[in-house]
Each structure stands twice: as C-alpha cells, then as structure tokens.
Amino acid sequence: LPLPPAGLALPTDALQAESLEERIQEELVALGLLEEAEKTGDGGREEEGEEDEVLAELKKKQAELRTVMEYNHKQKEVLLGLARSELRRQEIRQQLQDLDSTVMDSFKRFSQAKRSMSKKERDAIWRDMDDWQALCRRFVSCNQRN
C-alpha cells in the first residue's frame, strides 16, 4: 500500500486489508472458484516449480527424441546403401538374363545352321560370351561386398 501523506493516519480497514484478502480467498476456495495452491501467497512459486518439473521432463524427452532421431538417420543411411547395392545387383541380373538369352539364341542358330558360320558371326558370339562372363564377375563381386 502506498504511504499516506504525512499527518494522515491509515484507516483501520486499510490495516486489515490483508486479512480481508485472506478471508475472500478462503471463501473462493470454499465455493470451488479458487484452488488451495492459488490461495496461498506462494501459489505462483508452486506452479513455477511444477512448470520447472514439466520443462525438465520436456527437455529430457527432447534429448531422448534427438537420440532416437540420430539412430533412425544412421539406420536410414545404412538401408539406403543396401537398397542401392540391391538395385545394382538387380540391374546386373537383368543384363545377365538378356545376354544369356542372346547367347542361347546364337547357340541355337549355330547348332541348326546347315552351313558353317562366318567369322563375323563367330566373333559376335564370342563377344557376347565375353560380355556374359564380365557381367558374371561383376555380379559375384557385387554380392561379395555385401
């Protein structure tokens, strides 16, 4: 309360303002409009303490979440690498199947030919066989890395 001007005395009601406030707060608590913690003068401090606990728990959970996020990111990178190498293997496998059918077609033509094959045809078959062997080596080395 502000101090009264000099020479003026405080009315007795003003001196009892604090007890009046306490009685009003008690009445509000009794009516259920105010909680006990709010009634006490340190209610703000209690709420602040509860907020500190909530804040501390939030920070703890955020730290745990950061750890989980880092772990998930590392796992995602590992899985991405595995997926890329699997895609490479599938591409090589498809190329092998294509070359295999080409070599088989060439072999059928060679076995069914009534005439001897020309040098150009033989070279094409050997080239296909060399490509097939190179792809097989690539496929095997790709599998050994994983």
Image (cartoon, rainbow, N blue to C red):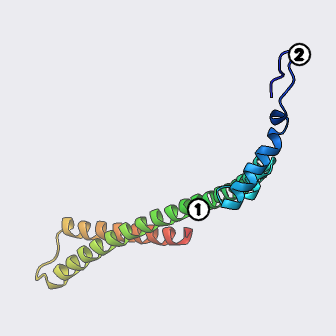
Residue highlighted by disc 2: 7
Task: Give residue 9's quadrant in the image.
Answer: top right
Give the percent coordinates (x, y) of residue 33.
64, 56
Q: Earlier in the sequence, mark 1 or mark 2?
A: 2
Of 60 and 54, the residue lying toward us:
54
Residue 99 or residue 24, whichever sits in front: 24
Q: Is residue 57 above or below residue 106?
A: above
Residue 67 in percent (x, y) is at: 67, 58
Q: Is residue 91 visible?
A: yes
Q: Nearer the viewer, residue 36 or 86?
A: 36
**Height in image: 31 above or below 143?**
above
Amino acid type, callout 2: Gly
The residue beneath circle 1 is 72
Task: State the CA–CA distance, disc 1 to disc 2.
Answer: 76 Å
27 on left or right of 7 = left
Of badges 1 and 2, the one in the foreground is: 2
Per the image, label 1 sits on a secondary structure element best described as helix
Q: Secondary structure at mark 2?
A: loop
Which residue is situated farthest in the left direction here? 114
Percent from the top left, x then y, of residue 86?
44, 68
Tell me: 69 left or right of 140.
Answer: right
Q: Residues within 10 Å of mark 1 (few under 14, many from 20)?
A: few
Task: Name the residue located 55 percent from the left edge and 59 percent from the top edge.
Answer: 77
> Residue 47: in sight, yes or no?
no
x, y (%) of residue 104?
24, 80
Q: Which mark is residue 84?
A: none
Q: Describe residue 122's horizontal placement relative to residue 16 as left or right.
A: left
Instruction: State yes or no: discs 1 and 2 in contact (Cβ < 8 Å).
Output: no
In depth, the one of 114 and 34 nearer the eye is 34
Q: What's the residue at 71%, 61% (across, down)?
A: 30
